[in-house]
Amino acid sequence: MNFSLYIAKRYLFSPGSSNAINIITGIAAAGVVIGAMSLFIVLSGFAGLKDFSLQFSTYFDPDLKIFPSEGKTFIFTKDQKTKISALDEVVNFSEIVEEHVLLEFREKQKTAFIKGVDANYSKVVQTDSILGYGEWLTNNDFQVVAGSGISRELSMGVEQTYTNLLNIYVPKPGKGIPTDPSKAFSIEKAVNIGIYSISEELDSKYLFATTGLVRKLLSLSEDKVTHIEIKLAPEADESRVKQELQSIFEDKVIVKNRVQLNDALYKMLNTENLVSYLVITLIAIIALFNVAGAIIMMIIDKKDNIKTLYNVGAALPKVRKIFLFQGLLMTILGTLLGLLLGFTLIVLQQRFGLLMITPSLPYPTRITATSFVIVFFTITIIGFIASLLASSRINQKLVN
């Protein structure tokens, strides 16, 4: 066994000559454990929070979404539909016609986006997961499905008959101010047959309708769309599919994946995660420099032993390694114990909901292998630096 490592283990597990040394060493070890545990809990908490925040996008956003490179709409030909259908990695696609509209129901008004979808939409997006009440759209062009926020603001429920209709207004295209305001808008009427719920923002933003209704409202031809939403096979190569789609549309479109569609949300979550990691790491650095203090106190306590080792032939580098290894062992063992405690707390949170956001919603967490690796190397590296600085205090003057 390595000489320095053997002595370091003996020093680590044997009590010091005074209670003060033992207390300082215990505080240093506790700081390592708490630092590792805290960092693991924070990383697991943010991983769970990220999943929780992004789960709504998996219900609403497709794997890929095609936008026009210019203007609001583009032509989607039968030939292009055939070519997309022929792609092995494309499971299905849906034509979308979307526009900003004014909604009116029983003298209450609200602006929103009307999203016209075709029959394939439920095969691209999990409509059964977002529908809270009522039914989803059929082929009837006089039906709509409202978000819970729209429904609440307009006091509009699921209507069983066609007596209470929702008025949908959109400005007619053209220039100048019309002399007759009643002719300035295209108007369609529809009945609300369902209410969906995704998130507070989306529930107040979108009203689903058929592409037939929206095209009629906007006076669009059958071959025009504002977007195309695509569902990919699980094993699909996203980059290759993007290139094939660009080729089909002759590079006249923009293709975005789910991450790009939620770019701002991803950046916000990643920034919060990084800031929290840095804050906890700073706290861990302060705590781990207690290890340096403990090693220095141990050097003072073992001063006579150090002189004896030096006199019997142990070179100064070997003596320094004793206390370097002692600090490193303390750090590694403390980190492992902290990871175990952190893992236990996260498992208990997932099982019993120790911390609740609302009475029915526990704080989301997710355990990842990356969290273990990040915590272990972060705490170990800081502990190594602290131990190296402390062990460097052993010099020729000390042993003379």
Image (cartoon, rainbow, N blue to C red):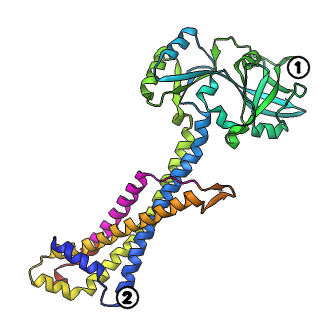
Which residue type does callout 1 highlight?
Answer: Ser
Image quarter hosting the N terminus: bottom left
- Residue 272 visible (yes or no): no
Q: Amino acid at mark 2?
A: Ala
In the current view of this chain or complex, which residue is farthest to the top? 79
Span colored in magenta: 364-388
Residue 392, given in percent of the width and then of the height, sits at: 24, 74
Which circle marks residue 18 in the picture? none
Task: Classify mark 1: helix, strand or loop.
Answer: helix
- Residue drawn 30% across and 90% down? 17
| Above or below 118: residue 42 | below
At mark 2, the secondary structure is helix
Give the number of the mark in front: 1 or 2.
Answer: 2
- The quarter of the image holding the C terminus is bottom left
Q: Nearer the viewer, residue 159 or 106?
A: 159
179 or 93: which is nearer to us? 93
Q: Magenta region, mostly helix, strand or loop?
A: helix
Give how far apart the Cα atoms at labels 1 and 2 are.
88 Å
Return the residue at label 2. 20
Can residue 330 be seen here? The reply is yes
Query: Is residue 102 placed above or below 360 in the rendered structure?
Result: above
Q: Quick one: which residue is furthest to the front in this view?
A: 351
The local crowd at label 1, few if under 14, some if 14 to 19, many if 20 or more residues have their Cα within 10 Å, is few
Q: Which mark is residue 182?
A: 1
Q: Is residue 384 magenta?
A: yes
